[in-house]
Image: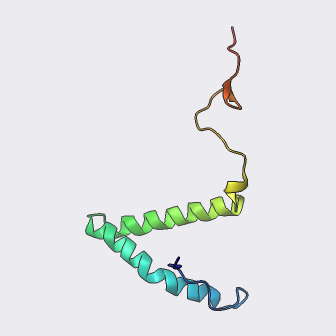
Amino acid sequence: MQQLIPPPSRPLSDVDTQLECEEMLDNPVRGFIEAFVQAGWPPTVVYKAVKNVVDHQAIAYAEDPDPADDAPTIEGAGDTVVGRRAPEME
């Protein structure tokens, strides 16, 4: 299977690795934003929204770099305990 995004061409410790990544992201991000603008979203709203989403994802990554390793949770499970309801309080 062909890899769509090439890996870094420099060692990860190279100071220019960040710049290389930014250059790789530039056109796809520009196209993504332009698609929203063409759909009628104001550019300032799109740029601010993208920045907020990226900031939130960066914070989430810093807090938990590999969430797949976490124990599974069930959204809205309330009193559910390992797949069964806790006894009702009377």
Asked if residue 61 is positioned above or below residue 79 in the image, the reply reads below
Q: Across the whole image, how many numbered discs are drawn on residues?
A: 0
**Colour scheme used in the picture?**
rainbow
Residue 23 location (% of width, % of height): 51, 87
Residue 69 location (% of width, % of height): 72, 55
Looking at the image, which is closer to me, 10 or 90? 10
Asked if residue 57 is positioned above or below residue 11 in the image, the reply reads above
Q: Residue at x 58, y 62 (%)?
A: 57
Which quadrant of the view contains residue 82?
top right
Q: Residue at x 33, y 73 (%)?
A: 34
Q: Residue at x 26, y 69 (%)?
A: 38
8 horizontally vs 33: left or right? right
Asked if residue 32 is positioned above or below residue 17 in the image, the reply reads above
Residue projecting furthest to the top: 90
In the picture, the quarter occupied by the C terminus is top right
Residue 55 location (% of width, % of height): 57, 65
Q: Residue at x 63, y 28 (%)?
A: 78
Which quadrant of the view contains residue 42?
bottom left
Residue 72 location (% of width, % of height): 68, 44
Asked if residue 90 is positioned above or below residue 56 in the image, the reply reads above
Looking at the image, which is closer to me, 47 or 33? 33
